[in-house]
Amino acid sequence: MLTEGARKVWSVLVWLVLVMLPIQFYLAGLGAFRFSHGTTTTHDNDWGAHAAFGSIIGLVVILVLVSGLLSRLPRQLMGMTVGLFVLMIVQIVLGQVGDSASVLAALHPVNALLITGLTMSLALRARAYLPFGRFKSEASADGATRSFANR
């Protein structure tokens, strides 16, 4: 029972991360254009919302990892979940090196694209575990279980 509940939590959290990522891209663009156009006086004011929201995403990804471990996901999904966690750690490190190593910091948006792609792939696979909606498996008249993909 814990496994089934944890899988539902995992799937909802994966989708939450997917929804949060475009917001994070928006905040990055907002910080970049405010900084480049001089509408704020310090670098931290420009990137503060992006950094804070990134920390929130990082916390959600930790919850994704914990719920994935508790849910005993299939090996491929667990590997992808661990990969998402690792990419988030790399993302934080790349964001922190900032001005001191601009060649490395320039990989921050590239890594963000990797995070987005992996999260999209996880979200598509997580549909089978969602606790609601049309992606939840249904039993047909003959007792066979049908998924959304088989409709």
Image: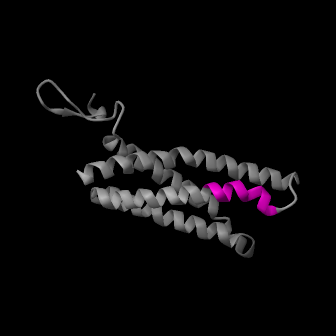
On the rendered structure, is 43 left or right of 111? right
Residue closer to the observer: 108 or 126: 126
On the rendered structure, is 5 left or right of 48? left
- Residue 21 picture location, percent across and down: 57, 49
Residue closer to the observer: 51 or 114: 51
Q: Is residue 124 magenta?
A: no
Task: Kindly indicate the quadrant of the structure image that contains residue 79.
Answer: bottom left
Going 72% across and 70% down the picture, which residue do you hit? 102
What's the magenta bit mostly, secondary-structure-wise? helix
Going 53% across and 60% down the picture, which residue do you hit? 58
Please state the extent of the stretch shown in magenta in the rendering.
43-53
77 w.r.t. 128: above or below: below
60 w.r.t. 96: above or below: above
On the rendered structure, is 70 left or right of 22? left
- Residue 4 picture location, percent across and down: 26, 49
Task: Kindly indicate the quadrant of the structure image that contains residue 12.
Answer: top left
Q: Is residue 52 magenta?
A: yes
Q: Residue furthest bottom?
A: 100
Task: Kindly indicate the quadrant of the structure image that contains residue 143.
Answer: top left
Q: Quadrant of the C terminus?
A: top left
26 w.r.t. 115: above or below: above
- Residue 118 picture location, percent across and down: 46, 53
Q: Residue furthest left?
A: 142
